[in-house]
Amino acid sequence: MHNVKINQNSLLLRYTLMKKYKYYYKYILKIITFKRMKKINFFNIKNVNKTHS
């Protein structure tokens, strides 16, 4: 009985951790994609300036 209690607690802990990390993972992904998009836009602007001048 005591072991079952510990197992349930560890499962619950794992579940909460997973939820937390899922949130962080989405947040980090957003930041990465945002930075990448900024970089791409920056390069596009440089290229556009090159072709126009």
Image (cartoon, rainbow, N blue to C red):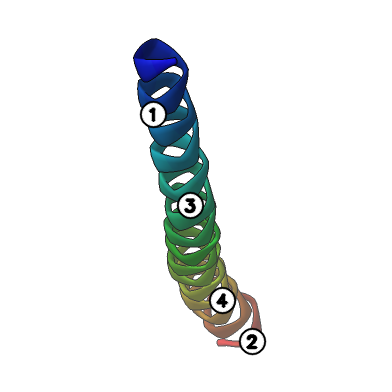
Residue at mark 2: 52
Point out the frontmost of discs 4 and 1.
1
Which amino acid type is marked by label 3?
Answer: Tyr
Point out the frontmost of discs 4 and 3.
3
Side of 48 where 21 appears, left or right: left
Q: Position of residue 46 (x, y in %)?
A: 48, 76
Sequence-earlier tag: 1 or 3: 1
Position of the C terminus by quadrant: bottom right
Taking depth in this image into account, of 51 and 43 the one nearest to the observer is: 43
Question: In the structure shown, which secondary structural element does the residue marked by tag 1 occupy?
Answer: helix
Separation (CA) of disc 1 from disc 3: 22 Å
Q: Position of residue 39 (x, y in %)?
A: 45, 67
Taking depth in this image into account, of 35 and 48 the one nearest to the observer is: 35
Point out the frontmost of discs 2 and 1.
1
Q: Residue at x 53, y 67 (%)?
A: 30
Taking depth in this image into account, of 26 and 16 the one nearest to the observer is: 16
Which amino acid type is marked by label 2?
Answer: His
Sequence-earlier tag: 2 or 4: 4
Where is 31 relative to 17, above or below? Answer: below
Q: Residue at x 35, y 17 (%)?
A: 2
Which amino acid type is marked by label 4?
Answer: Asn
Residue at mark 4: 41
Q: Residue at x 54, y 76 (%)?
A: 50
Separation (CA) of disc 2 from disc 4: 16 Å
Q: Which mark is residue 10?
A: 1
Residue at mark 3: 25
Label pair 3/2, CB-CB below 8 angstroms: no
Label pair 4/3, CB-CB below 8 angstroms: no
Separation (CA) of disc 2 from disc 1: 62 Å
Question: In the structure shown, which secondary structural element does the residue marked by tag 3 occupy?
Answer: helix
Q: Position of residue 20 (x, y in %)?
A: 44, 56
Tally the marks. 4
